[in-house]
Image (cartoon, rainbow, N blue to C red):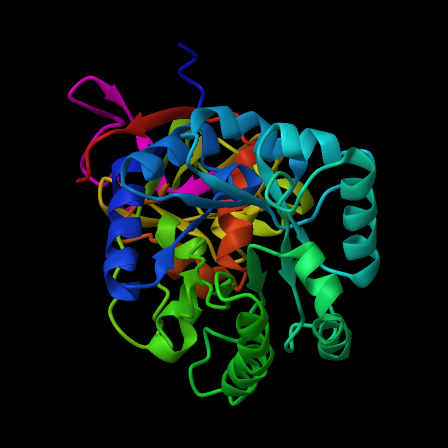
Amino acid sequence: MNENTGILTINVAAVAANWRAIAAHAHPSITSAVIKADAYGLGAAQIGPELYRSGCRHFFFATLTEAVSVRPLLGDDAHCYLLGGVPVGGEADAVRHRLVPVLSSLSAVERWLRWRVESGLSATAAPAALKFDTGMTRLGLAAGELEQLLADEARWLALSPVLLMSHLAVADDTSNPQNKRQRDAFFALGGRAKQLQPGLLLSLANSCGIYLGRDYHADLVRPGAALYGFNPSPESASPVSGVVRLTLPVIALRTLTESASVGYGAEYGGRKGQVLAVVAGGYADGLHRVLGPDGYGLCRGVKVPVVGRVSMDSAVFDVTAALAGGSAWVDGERLTIEVINPDVLTLDVLTARNQALGYEVLTSLRAGRYRRIYQAEAV
């Protein structure tokens, strides 16, 4: 084992417990799981099956490639959706792997219908979902385009989507009137679609949207960030638990015998008597997003600040306070510094501190060289 490697501990049991808590809150709506981007960087191959064992049957991916790699690990009765749709030429692969593309434009709808006819496949054999825009102005049919499609009943029934969805833009801001505008716009057209196709599933609420109220839940809710420990209800205590711990080994200690500049750019002036710890972990490991501009970690339970610039493979912490009267070794174990944990340095704390999106913090760990440990029991 390489001792100079940070340890990223991921509690998959806690992820599953978070899903169950959200499912209980959203009942009787179906609770799905968004495991795109390798389950937000934490490992879809480990997390997806655990969620399936917990009862989840609807999963969302971003791309065909990531879905194909995880689909065999889920049960035959799992419903797997491709949020980014299906690329030209990828239609047969999507159907073969039982993946449901989310179509977000009229051209995508027409291409899917044309391919399905040419392939001699029914809507049941090659299902699709449909997304329309209610205020995100990103992916999705414009409201007028969906109205056009709904007005052509034969065309709609030829498509027979299994899911109609949209996406809230400001669900984390409960007082923002855009939430209600999007909700009303969604259900106005969603209701018309249900009249044409009663078995159609409607889905609007993301993690924060689930906690805006039951009138946002529709038939299926889509938690993503909340599964991985982000508080989906920022104005109250978090209903979910942290799942990630990142521990970095100290690979060198420097006690300054005189004042000295630290790191690239000589931006930080070290003082005589300071004890500086160099850890294995830098911006190549996503550490810049984790730490932020005023970063710190925990060493022996003591807050220790980052000093100087984060380098590609290392960062420097001032551990003077943590080592006061002690040594670098505790019970024979090398000194370490935690920069994420489920209790104090949570993802919500990091997000608030470094002003980066929590998703950026988490997914930036994907590129790291950390040794991963998956916990099967909630703590």
Position of residue 302 relative to residue 3, above or below, is below
Q: Is residue 37 left or right of residue 302?
A: right
Q: Quadrant of the N terminus?
A: top left
Q: Position of residue 365 (x, y in %)?
A: 52, 38
Residue at x 64%, y 49% (from the top left corner): 128
Residue at x 69%, y 55% (from the top left corner): 159
Residue at x 66%, y 34% (from the top left corner): 94
Q: Position of residue 354 (x, y in %)?
A: 50, 60
The residue sitting at the top extreme is 1
Q: Nearer the viewer, residue 223 or 99?
A: 99
Position of residue 333 relative to residue 170, above or below, is above
- Extent of the magenta region: 316-338
* Residue 362 appears in the picture as rendered: yes
Position of residue 241 relative to residue 338, above or below, is below
Q: Quadrant of residue 238?
A: bottom left
Q: Nearer the viewer, residue 345 or 53?
A: 53
Q: Quadrant of the C terminus?
A: top left
Q: Is residue 285 magenta?
A: no
Residue at x 60%, y 78% (from the top left corner): 189
Q: Is residue 328 magenta?
A: yes
Q: Quadrant of residue 236?
A: bottom left
